[in-house]
Amino acid sequence: MNDETQRPAATIVTAAPRHEPKPADPCVMVIFGAFGDLTKRLVVPALYNLTRTGILPAHFALIGVDLADGTAESWREHLHTMLESFVGNTSAEFEVDKIDDKAWSSLAGRMSYVQGDITKPELYNKLADTLAEVQKKQGIGGNVMFYLAVADRFFGTVVDRLGDAKLTHQDEGEDGKPRFWRRVVIEKPFGHDLASARALNAEIGRSLREDQIFRIDHFLGKETVQNIMAFRFANGLFEPLWNRDRIDHVQITVAETVGVEGRGKFYEVTGALRDMVPNHVFTLLAMVAMEPPVGFDAQSIRNKKGEVFTAVPPVPPENAVRGQYGPGKVLGQPKKAYREEPNVAKDSNIETYCAMKLEIDNWRWAGVPFYLRTGKNMASRLTEIAIRFKEAPHAPFESGPAGPPPPNWLVITIQPDEGISLQFEVKRPGPEVVLATVRMNFSYSDWFPKEPNVGYETLLYDVMIGDATLFHRADMVEEAWRVVQPVLDAWGSQKADFPNYVSGSDGPSAADALIARDGGRRWRPVTSDTEHKA
Ligand code: BG6
């Protein structure tokens, strides 16, 4: 069988002509945390991919800033070694057959390095000099993107120092518009609770206008997450079903097979709730629950997402469950308990799993519960949004031996097998009327070639063109923290009975009880094997 015969019988009926992306604005990108993990695993590989695909502006330069003793040369080598480790590596962020030497040399040739302590004003003077030099040498105007790939406790300080050194200042021309842009990309976690998120917004707001701030959430770089909007708003079919009349409940799952992976120190002050829920899981929530935006500009879309969060009441602690993994086996590999991980306390009270039920108090969703869960060391890697429809109003088949027919599910799988699947009932061929549950599957890989991509490409490009659609606004971040704050407070002050789930399982039994409380509902199994999903 060749590739063509393996494709679905149908073909793409119409596709909007593929327009070439507009070239990004000429700019300098400054990465704080140049020798850090994020920079080498994701940010620079994404820049390399943008170079490969010709989207990076011709006038572009990259300045790395770090405390580590280094030079432009040693930084380049460090990054190249990482890139080499992707070659033929199926478990890497992205697998490549070989490094495109031309693309790499082009990117590497634009790199400079500034060594120094990001808390000290002197560094920013040094940075200003290098910036001016690079801008002059490479004919780049005043546009600068500052990327904060540093520990979150430094976010406020770095922005303050950039402000003090006037590096975030955008000169205005005679028309009152900035002559060039200065933008700051801030990684997560943005605050660790509502009060700290508010304080951080206020602090960075002293040096930056909101349109200069790009709060990044890499889930929004995932194609399938972005596709949820296309799926919902480019198809008339689903909108009439997308409400409390037709939908029974929604389950959002972000299950990981990895544990804390040497990040014990970070995790001990973070935990699953802070690490995943008000950011990544809420991103999925917003996509599925938002109202149709009036336009597809950043303002309209972010308004609608923000409205979803505003409509969610704070989650009472009794509607949330926490878990921590004990020893077990994940995908056949033995795993130790969380409390045995490096830099983790032997009596740690930190959760590696959490589940919660929340409500959205608006016209569309009143009475439709949203169940969210995320955890580490679970049975399978699976990120999905599962929408369970209400049962048929009248079931003529009820008397069958298997009871009433199961309800319909619409499942949007974000990873690992990106696609959309609709589950419904059909009659099994034969003389008797016997029902069978079947699925209609759309799989991205059947239709579109997979681009080697780490997920940061679109996001970096969007910063360069000033499109904030895929970034969180100050109010959205604060609203998300507000929703989970009661749970954070309760968990921070009460000792848990941990560990309470086996590594390689679907999570703690208390989570099953949480959802079963509502009329015997059940979580979908955490397995990417679709055969088990009926
Ligand atoms: C990060 C979290 O933001 O997202 C990690 O800090 C988590 O703990 C990761 O593993 C999940 O992202 P992805 O893209 O691998 O699903």
Image: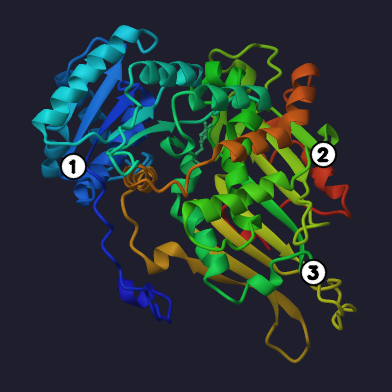
Dot 2 falls on a residue whose secondary structure is: helix
Using the rendered view, name the quadrant where residue 8 is placed. bottom left
Identity of the residue drawn at 62% across and 44% down = 282
The one of 78 and 281 positioned closer to us in this rendering: 281
Using the rendered view, name the quadrant where residue 150 is placed. top left
Mark-to-mark CA distance, 2 and 3 = 24 Å
Give the labeled residue for mark 2.
319
- Nearest to viewer (mark 2 / mark 3): 3
Give the amino acid type for the residue marked by disc 3 in the picture: Asp
On the image, the x and y values in percent for residue 77 come to: 18, 24
Give the labeled residue for mark 3.
245
Question: 460 left or right of 367?
Answer: left
On the image, the x and y values in percent for residue 110 come to: 15, 32
Judge whether 519 appears above or below 131 on screen: below
Q: Closer to the N terminus: mark 2 or mark 3?
A: 3
Give the amino acid type for the residue marked by disc 2 in the picture: Asn
Dot 3 falls on a residue whose secondary structure is: loop
Q: Closer to the N terminus: mark 2 or mark 1?
A: 1
Dot 1 falls on a residue whose secondary structure is: loop
Mark-to-mark CA distance, 2 and 1 = 49 Å
Give the labeled residue for mark 1.
99
The one of 242 and 466 positioned closer to us in this rendering: 466
On the image, the x and y values in percent for residue 21 come to: 28, 58
